[in-house]
Image: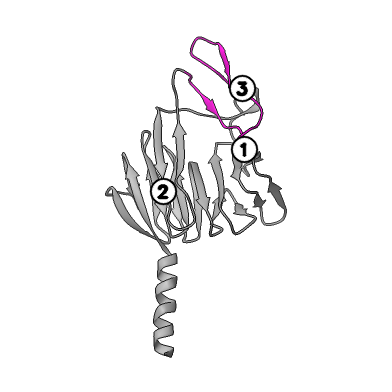
Amino acid sequence: MFGFSCVALGSNVASESKAVLRASGKVQVNGTGGREITTLFSGDTIQTGEDSVANITTSRSSVLVMPNASVKFLGNSVELTQGGMSIATSAGMAALADGLTITPTAQKLSKFEVVEYEDSVVIAAREGDVTVSDGQQTSTVPEGQQTTRKKKRAGAALGANGSHAISGKTVAIVAGTAGAIAAAVIVLANSGDSKKCISPSGGKKCCTQNQQGNNNCQ
């Protein structure tokens, strides 16, 4: 019985430290072009191209890696080094970015986004609250709101109206998860507008400027 328990425990640890990557477009794993479906282990790095996305799934978590992004899979956390990612988790999966640790406040379904810019990191809580810690101070981002943290090193100025923007071709992807997580649908669109800003669900209007210089507020 003791031997069986040890084997079972080892298998559980192994299952928590690996995940499945589903790639759409040009996606590299550890610097090498990966297959459409790849098994990931803790420490693996993922880099997406301009028109590519990647979906990382574990038993109770799903991570959508956006175009032109770079992340490191760390088991029950993902470190963002470039671009943006969206996480849906019921296992408390955390995100790391520029010395910040972003963690769901409750062990239930949570959805949040983290986007890194040259000068700042934007964190948006889509479903459930998240805590943001820099190792010295901790704050909470309530559901439906977002916060911007200035990066440790100096960078470029903010975009128009003090908000950042994501540009790129239209990308639509459905990220499925196992267990208690329902399918998440993420759409990145650029239909005539040069920029699309991030705003919390149900928040204030988000304004962008198209190629003709006209404002388009949603």
79 within the magenta span: no
Start-end of magenta stretch: 193-218
Q: Residue at left 41%, top 51%?
A: 56
In terms of secondary structure, where does tag 1 sit? loop
217 within the magenta span: yes
| C-beta proximity under 8 Å, tags 1 and 3 | no
Q: Residue at left 62%, top 42%?
A: 151
Viewer-proximal residue among 188 and 162: 188
Circle 1 packing at 10 Å, graded few (<14), some (14-19), many (20+), is few
The kind of residue on which mark 3 rests is Ala
Q: Nearer the viewer, mark 2 or mark 3?
A: 2
Q: Nearer the viewer, mark 1 or mark 3?
A: 3
**Cα distance in 3D space between marks 2 and 1:** 37 Å
Circle 2 packing at 10 Å, graded few (<14), some (14-19), many (20+), is some
- x and y percent of residue 102 in the render? 60, 51
**Res 43 → quadrant:** bottom left
Query: On residue 160, which mark appears?
Result: 3
Circle 3 packing at 10 Å, graded few (<14), some (14-19), many (20+), is few
The kind of residue on which mark 2 rests is Gly
Q: Quadrant of the N terminus?
A: bottom left
Q: Earlier in the sequence, mark 2 or mark 1?
A: 1
Helix, strand or loop for the magenta stretch, by majority: loop
Q: Which residue is mark 1?
A: 154
In terms of secondary structure, where does tag 2 sit? loop
- x and y percent of residue 131 in the render? 66, 52
Q: Which residue is mark 2?
A: 176
- x and y percent of residue 157 in the render? 61, 29
